[in-house]
Image: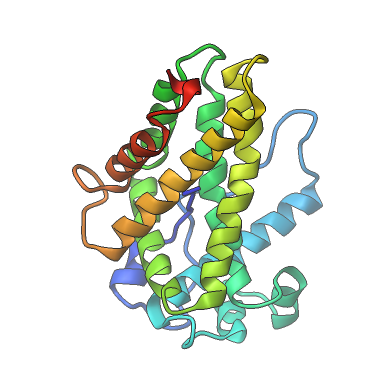
Amino acid sequence: MARFASLSLDAIAGHAGRYASPVRSPRPYSPQAGPGAQSLTERRKAATQLDIARAACELFAEHGPDGTTAEDIAHRAGVALRTFYRYFRNKQEAVAPLLAGGGDAWRALLAEEDPGTPLAAALERAVTRSLSDSQAVEEGLKVTRGLLRAATGDEALRAVWYRVNQESEERLVPVVARLAGPDADVVSVRLLAAAATDAIRVALEVWSAGDAPVSGPGSPADLAVHCLRELTGAMPLLR
């Protein structure tokens, strides 16, 4: 989860022009390596989807979902409206690739941990790293705050947020299972994946509703570790 890629802060804080040029994401798309590498066509499609997602997040933060149309998003992204609808059913769905990118990043950090590493430490380390320690992450968190605030009044946008979190939880299960070892109980693994995902989701929602900074006390990383400890403290896998 949080799993969340980002845009330039100038577009958010400065209320840049409605049809400003697209800006770079601090979590740029990067092709896979190895046997599962994507083809050039697949990489181009993914890059186009991210361009559209960046434009959607930018406009939602500036004007809100009600003040943004699919045409606005396509124009900001520099694509034709038919291209927009080739990838997304509606304007709210367009933010999903950026939201999913945050989850991909945190799972990748957790996957770097060696099997047998104490799970509690591994989870807290991955959560903290994914929500701090770089300007790109900090910019992404500020855009996430704007997007989640916009979602409070838009049911369809909230549905995308919850769906992305559900998908992230499902993809987290095999990562947790690998770290927990072959003897780990399946139910315990599923519960831990659910708790870790919800810890980050709740932390981001609480942080986005307030004015706490992106680092230090009350930050997403600080809140996520707190939520993680509260949700998982009694779980056998972490003892």
The x and y percentages for residue 29 are: 60, 48
Q: Quadrant of residue 44?
A: bottom right
The x and y percentages for residue 208 are: 32, 61
Q: Is residue 58 above or below residue 143?
A: below
Q: Nearer the viewer, residue 151 or 132?
A: 151
The x and y percentages for residue 152 are: 41, 73
Quadrant of image for the C terminus: top left
Q: Is residue 37 above or below residue 49?
A: above
The x and y percentages for residue 203 are: 35, 50
Task: Answer left or right for 2 relative to 170.
Answer: left
Q: Nearer the viewer, residue 233 or 228?
A: 233
Query: Does residue 14 show up?
Result: yes
Q: Is residue 159 above or below residue 117?
A: below
Q: Nearer the viewer, residue 41 or 87?
A: 87
Q: What count of labels does the image hold?
A: 0
Q: Quadrant of residue 108?
A: top right
Q: Nearer the viewer, residue 119 or 113?
A: 119
Q: Residue at x 50, y 22 (%)?
A: 237
Query: Does residue 30 show up?
Result: no
Task: Answer left or right for 117 relative to 83.
Answer: left
Q: Residue at x 37, y 58 (%)?
A: 205
